[in-house]
Image: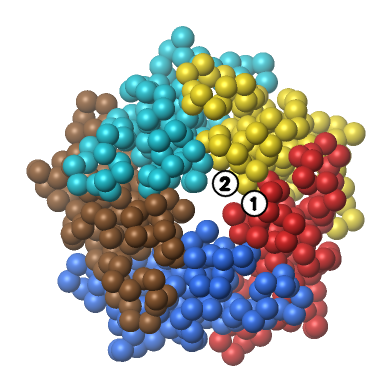
Chain colours: A yellow, B cyan, C brown, D red, E blue
Amino acid sequence: MQIAKVRGTVVSTIQDPTLRGVKLLMLQLVDENGNLLPKYEVAADNSVGAGIDEWVLVSCGSAAREVPGNKQRPVDAAVVAIIDSIYVEDRLIYSKKDQYR
Amino acid sequence: MQIAKVRGTVVSTIQDPTLRGVKLLMLQLVDENGNLLPKYEVAADNSVGAGIDEWVLVSCGSAAREVPGNKQRPVDAAVVAIIDSIYVEDRLIYSKKDQYR
Amino acid sequence: MQIAKVRGTVVSTIQDPTLRGVKLLMLQLVDENGNLLPKYEVAADNSVGAGIDEWVLVSCGSAAREVPGNKQRPVDAAVVAIIDSIYVEDRLIYSKKDQYR
Amino acid sequence: MQIAKVRGTVVSTIQDPTLRGVKLLMLQLVDENGNLLPKYEVAADNSVGAGIDEWVLVSCGSAAREVPGNKQRPVDAAVVAIIDSIYVEDRLIYSKKDQYR
Amino acid sequence: MQIAKVRGTVVSTIQDPTLRGVKLLMLQLVDENGNLLPKYEVAADNSVGAGIDEWVLVSCGSAAREVPGNKQRPVDAAVVAIIDSIYVEDRLIYSKKDQYR
């Protein structure tokens, strides 16, 4: 899984019928030091209800279809968790409580 | 999913029999700021009927075969939605209504 | 799918038994302007019979196993079509008839 | 599989229900000479119990769901082995016994 | 598939139980001109028995699990063939007989 920050949403009217009602979030990927990368992923979030600026874990590939309800949806990325904290050795590199970085 | 702009089409006569009748679009990928990237994907569009210059969402990998009709087709990319608008925080970075960028 | 030019072949005697008789082509990937990239893929061609210098579509990942006969073969890339022409907006960027570029 | 060093953990309360109780490790990838790369993977470890600074093998994609218990979890990366030693030709480039590099 | 040269082995005692007895090779990837790339893959070889310095084809992703015995193993890369020769147009760029390059 990769770490990403929720940046926005993608809105669509004409879409594969199975995608109706699925929230599509614009995620910006975060590197191992907690910095934003110039990479994004549009991911389905029908499981955790992540909001703007939250840090999340995104699963890509067929894993995205293991989220309940996605089995037959043509999604290749899904939000699977909202991150509370990230520790690298003894260092806390992200804490949701302290800040939305 | 990645954001892409429909740039053209790929035409083929000799192909895997299951691909007959499937529209193959030449998509150019778009970055998180809405700029065209030097990357493309040839994707099947048998679901949404996207036209030249429209912005779409493309799903890659096994997800492409969840689009109705693709189950047994050897496609690794499919158009799954035509994008109406993309919001990053409060900023509208793309609106189909205003422009085909 | 990616666009690729058939450059050669890979020959093997000691191989997974299911690969026996499968033609393995050395493909060089082509960018969105029709230029050769410094990237290749060795792909199974048991469907379309592509020849040297032809431009083809290559499907990667599990899609390669949807080509008839590949269901249980450990192949992660397959040729799925021989390209006749590629149009980007009004411009013809490749035509098999005119040239093998 | 890629070689990675266990650097830390990712903690989450709001997550896909199937992820409850799954340890999520922050792994930093290692190159072919044993140097840390500026790339990471957050991987499930419910199989081998790797600890901080250990070197592991990480499997990505659908393979991650072959680890017992992951079948229906939306994980795209899993720790599948703790590495004892890596030999490149006659050279030992990593030995767990000697050091946690 | 990608072309790779067998460089060494990875040894592990604590591993996913299904991996017991599976030989894990350290492969270095080779480019389209036959030069070694700064990229590697640790791949299961339970099919062809490749030795140090041999050139092989490696299949990645779910294809790796089509090798007999791997169906339920969490491996994302497998050696599927030992390469005898590679031809690019009329040029022989690799021959096992002549050399282990």
Which residue does the numbered mark 1 point to in the structure image? Answer: D76
Q: Which residue does the image show at 74% across and 48% down from the upper left?
A: A33
Q: Amino acid at mark 1?
A: Asp
Report crowding for label 2: few under 14, some 14 to 19, many 20 or more residues within 10 A (C-alpha): many
Which of the two residues, D12 or E70, is positioned nearer the viewer here? E70
- In the image, taking residue D87 as reference, residue C1 lies left or right, namely left
What x and y, as percent, mark residue A98?
90, 34
Report crowding for label 1: few under 14, some 14 to 19, many 20 or more residues within 10 A (C-alpha): many
What x and y, as percent, mark residue D43?
72, 55
Instruction: Say whether mark 1 and mark 2 are on the same chain.
Output: no
Circles 2 and 1 in contact, beta carbons < 8 Å? yes
Q: Amino acid at mark 2?
A: Gly
- The quarter of the picture where the N terminus of chain C appears is top left
- In the image, taking residue A56 as reference, residue A78 lies left or right, namely left
**Above/below status of E18 relative to A62:** below
Q: Which residue does the image show at 43% across and 13% down from the upper left?
A: B99
Which of the two residues, C15 or D6, is positioned nearer the viewer here? C15
What x and y, as percent, mark residue D64?
65, 57
